[in-house]
Image: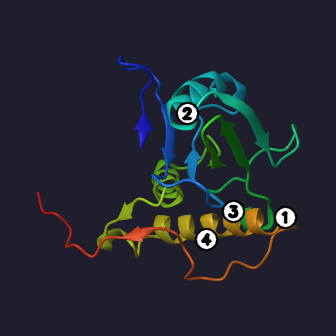
Amino acid sequence: MIYPIGGRRQANPIRLSVARELGREIDGAWWPRVDRITNELPNLVAVLTPLLGDINSINVNWSPLQRPPDLNWRGWEHKRQHVMTVSGTHSSANLLIISYATHSALALMVMRCAANLLIEAADRDKPAFLTAGSILRAAQQQRAVPTPQGDCSPGHGRCKRSDRAPSQA
């Protein structure tokens, strides 16, 4: 889920998740560490280049002064989710941008759902999973229909669910 750059470990690795198969409304998520994402953008490009090929464009669906919605509090439902499309010579990825200030449990769950990673059965009833599914559905609908926020109907999440019993330590 978190991809280190090169062979050495960074002090602050990029927090990124990307699905194995690309080409959907949302292919993954990026959780920057700071408000100014331009500080981390070169490292993001470096991580995505082996997957997408040489990066030739980055497009965003928000204005320069607009911050991503604060996912920690109610009201995010009425704001446009920030999605960045990174295009390379081989492929492109639509990344949901998670605000740097998002609580870690929620941010990690959004990252897992956005990349279509397995979610353990024990985690499916947790508030972070339920909220992450709503956030992802809102972003998917906004990408599919380029109009202001639509109604998020439950049950259409992209998260894979694991039916295995929780592992015991």
Q: Residues within 10 Å of mark 3 (few under 14, many from 20)?
A: many
Viewer-proximal residue among 88 and 25:
88
Q: How much space separates mark 2 and mark 3, taking CA atoms?
A: 21 Å
Residue receiving disc 1: 146
Query: Quick one: label 1 or label 2, which is nearer the N terminus?
Result: 2
Question: Quarter holding the N terminus?
Answer: top left
The residue sitting at 87% across, 67% down in the picture is 148
In the rendered structure, find residue 134 and report the number of the disc placed on it: 4
Q: According to the image, label 3 marks what residue? A: 139
Q: Is residue 75 visible?
A: no
Q: Quadrant of residue 144?
A: bottom right
How far apart, in angstroms, are the residues tagged by discs 3 and 1? 10 Å
Residue type at the position of mark 1:
Pro
Q: Amino acid at mark 3?
A: Ala
Identify the residue under disc 2.
48
Mark 2 or 3 closer to N-term? 2
- Which residue does the image show at 79% across and 59% down from the upper left? 80
Mark-to-mark CA distance, 1 and 2 = 25 Å
Q: Determine the residue positioned at 48% across, 48% down.
A: 104
Residue 106 lies, in percent from the top left, at 51, 56
